[in-house]
Image: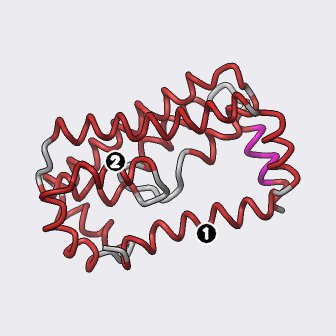
């Protein structure tokens, strides 16, 4: 089943509308969606390695726009939209604990979440809720998301075929590792902060 899902994702990545899907996933992942855009970015770059910069740019722009949407949710719609999202991830306690820390270190928190598997959407909403300086928020988001997506894309561009062979050979292990990192990011919201 995992092999069929991988093959389907690779075929989806080569379709004409794949860039729109990549932009859409990148946008919603920054504000509400739990699945990172790497799920599409990686097979798209592997399918069309010469377009790695374009795909990284699409991810970065859409992700930062999505982050601004998350900021708006936190600033203006927290009770209606933001709180249910935080509740969905069971992050209420973590949300309260980091509020004081965030007044001082918020920009670094956004940068950390923008680069790592930490759930970025939690900090985009939190940034709006706490009133983190919007310019700081946008600049750090551009730097962090750009770094992440360009690094992933460049590595795939540079080492594409060996990485593709490695992925295909170790698909089960890599899927498990991806899920551990994804779930670990969400768990860290509750226990680290």
Neighbours of disc 2 within 10 Å: few (<14), some (14-19), many (20+): many
Colour scheme employed for the rendering of this structure = secondary structure
Asked whether residue 141 is drawn in magenta, I would say no
In the image, what residue occupies the spot 28% across and 44% down?
69
Determine whether the residue tagged by mark 1 lies in a helix, strand or loop.
helix
Left or right side of 59 for 122:
left
Determine whether the residue tagged by mark 2 lies in a helix, strand or loop.
helix
Q: Nearer the viewer, mark 1 or mark 2?
A: 2
Residue 30 in percent (x, y) is at 39, 48
Residue 67 in percent (x, y) is at 32, 44
In the image, what residue occupies the spot 13% across and 43% down?
133
Residue under pointer 2: 111
In the image, what residue occupies the spot 83% across and 48% down?
166
Left or right side of 50 for 94:
left
Q: Earlier in the sequence, mark 1 or mark 2?
A: 2
Q: Which sits in the foreground, 192 or 20? A: 192
Left or right side of 71 for 32:
right
Asked whether residue 9 is drawn in magenta, I would say yes
Mark pair 1, 2: CA separation: 21 Å
Residue 15 in percent (x, y) is at 71, 29
Rendering quarter of residue 106: bottom left
Residue under pointer 1: 180
Give the numbered dot on residue 106.
none
Span of residues in magenta: 5-11
């Amino acid at each position: 089943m995992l092999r069929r899902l991988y093959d389907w994702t690779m075929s989806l990545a080569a379709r004409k509308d794949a860039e729109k899907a990549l932009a859409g996933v990148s946008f919603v992942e920054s504000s509400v969606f739990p699945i990172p855009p790497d799920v599409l970015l990686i097979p798209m770059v592997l399918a069309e390695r010469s377009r790695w910069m374009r795909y990284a740019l699409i991810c970065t722009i859409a992700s930062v726009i999505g982050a601004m949407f998350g900021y708006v949710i936190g600033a203006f719609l927290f009770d209606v939209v933001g709180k249910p999202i935080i509740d969905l991830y069971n992050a209420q306690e973590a949300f309260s604990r980091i509020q004081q820390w965030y007044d001082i270190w918020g920009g670094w928190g956004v940068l950390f979440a923008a680069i790592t598997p930490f759930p970025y959407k939690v900090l985009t909403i939190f940034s709006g809720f706490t009133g983190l300086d919007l310019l700081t928020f946008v600049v750090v988001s551009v730097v962090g998301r750009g770094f992440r997506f360009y690094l992933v894309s460049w590595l795939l561009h540079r080492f594409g075929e060996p990485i593709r062979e490695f992925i295909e050979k170790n698909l089960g292990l890599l899927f498990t590792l991806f899920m551990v990192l994804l779930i670990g990011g969400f768990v860290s919201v509750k226990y680290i902060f």
